Image: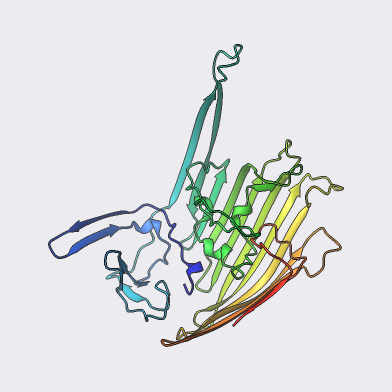
């Protein structure tokens, strides 16, 4: 909760809300079932804040005062939501979302085709709350046809454009997996899952996701855990095997608000050809981060090192490292950024549009 990268407005669960405008004021009520939230049984106090954005007057108001030099979602500035009685454990939070699709195609210029060719497909998702802090998500033959499309952008640069993840399966606790690295070096980017490179044209093509699971949440007060495993189908027309994607992310709290994080990513070809140059049999990456957030909110930053493990024996400098430090006061801010990406740092499941460069930004 220290940067805009930590913020996501994609949370979607069961809730209800309504508002009414009166003469010189308005009232809004929001009802969120306890079973849709993750909290410790017996807790009596929550950290809480509320925000109001008035677009007509361009005014942003908060329940708890936040200094003007801090970002609005900073978790260092929260009030206390006190309950009269200790909260009881909510009921089982298990949801299953199956789907069935059907479609027909007919070529009216073909006289031999007298009826449409029908296609049927099925699959589904399941979400299981294992504990008050841990969630297990399962998916089989997922259907992402209802996902919001990306906005249209004209790219006039020689670098790839970053588009955020929008598939619901990957969104909850997305910061646990996706907030590693700095801008320009993201060692894990979930949108790489389900995308492959055509061996004939070199263009990106969509690959079918067969199934997957995701375990994420808080193990205890200091440790967060994320495990992701996805399997894609073999693409015979494109000359590609199926790929398995495995990700492990750990985040351990240190001091008041800082943490140490670990990330491991593995992309593995299933039943791939040993002597082919069309694709890599595996691509792996591992690294560590230290994320600093001081108790008084004046200092923030991170330092990281990531190492890639590839099938190219001739590649050199298969690493990336960076350092960021920010000192924030009301009247001024001082920031230092250092980033180096080696020419052999091939993170195929990450977003690294540029390699072999050193960037220093005071």
Q: Is residue 160 above or below residue 359?
A: above
Q: Left of 3 or right of it: where is 302?
A: right
Q: Left of 296 or right of it: where is 194?
A: right
Residues 319 and 33: in front is 319
Residues 144 and 185: in front is 185
Q: Is residue 173 above or below residue 299?
A: above
Residues 262 and 342: in front is 342
x 63%, y 47%: residue: 194
Q: Is residue 297 above or below residue 41?
A: below
Residue 32 image offset from top left, x and y in percent: 33, 57
Residue that lies at the very extreme toward the front in this rendered image: 156
Residue that lies at the very extreme toward the left in this rendered image: 23
Residue 114 image offset from top left, x and y in percent: 56, 13
Quadrant location of the C terminus in the rendered image = bottom right
x 19%, y 62%: residue: 26
Location of residue 289 by image quarter: bottom right
Residue 115 image offset from top left, x and y in percent: 54, 15
Total residue callouts: 0
Colouring convention used in this rendered image of the protein: rainbow
Residue 276 image offset from top left, x and y in percent: 84, 47
Location of residue 199 by image quarter: top right
């Amino acid at each position: 909760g220290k940067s805009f990268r930590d913020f996501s407005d994609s949370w979607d669960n069961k809730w209800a809300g309504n508002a009414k405008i009166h003469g010189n004021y308005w009232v809004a009520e929001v009802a969120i079932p306890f079973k849709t939230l993750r909290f410790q049984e017996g807790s009596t106090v929550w950290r809480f804040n509320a925000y109001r954005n008035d677009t007509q007057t361009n005014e942003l108001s908060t329940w708890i005062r936040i200094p003007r030099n801090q970002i609005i979602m900073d978790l260092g500035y929260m009030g206390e939501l006190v309950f009269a009685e200790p909260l009881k454990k909510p009921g089982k939070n298990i949801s299953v979302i199956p789907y069935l699709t059907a479609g027909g195609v007919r070529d009216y210029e073909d006289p031999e085709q007298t009826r449409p060719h029908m296609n049927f497909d099925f699959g589904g998702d399941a979400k299981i709350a294992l504990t008050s802090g841990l969630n297990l998500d399962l998916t089989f033959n997922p259907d992402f046809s209802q996902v919001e499309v990306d906005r249209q952008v004209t790219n006039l640069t020689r670098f790839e454009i970053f588009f955020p993840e929008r598939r619901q399966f990957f969104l909850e606790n997305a910061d646990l997996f996706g907030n590693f690295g700095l801008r320009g070096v993201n060692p894990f980017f979930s949108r790489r899952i389900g995308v492959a490179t055509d061996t004939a044209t070199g263009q990106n093509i969509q690959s079918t996701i067969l199934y997957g699971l995701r375990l994420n949440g808080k193990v205890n007060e200091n440790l967060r855990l994320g495990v992701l495993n996805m399997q894609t189908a073999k693409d015979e027309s494109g000359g590609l095997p199926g790929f398995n994607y495995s990700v492990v992310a750990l985040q351990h709290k240190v001091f008041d608000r800082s943490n140490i994080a670990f990330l491991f990513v593995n992309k593995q070809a299933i039943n791939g050809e040993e002597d082919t140059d069309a694709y890599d049999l595996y691509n792996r990456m591992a690294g560590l981060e230290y994320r600093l957030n001081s108790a008084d909110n004046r200092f923030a930053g991170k330092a990281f090192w990531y190492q890639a493990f590839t099938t190219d024996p001739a590649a050199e400098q298969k690493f990336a490292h960076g350092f960021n430090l920010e000192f924030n006061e009301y009247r001024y801010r001082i920031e230092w950024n250092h980033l180096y990406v080696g020419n052999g740092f091939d993170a195929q499941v990450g977003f690294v549009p540029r390699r072999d460069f050193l960037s220093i930004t005071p």
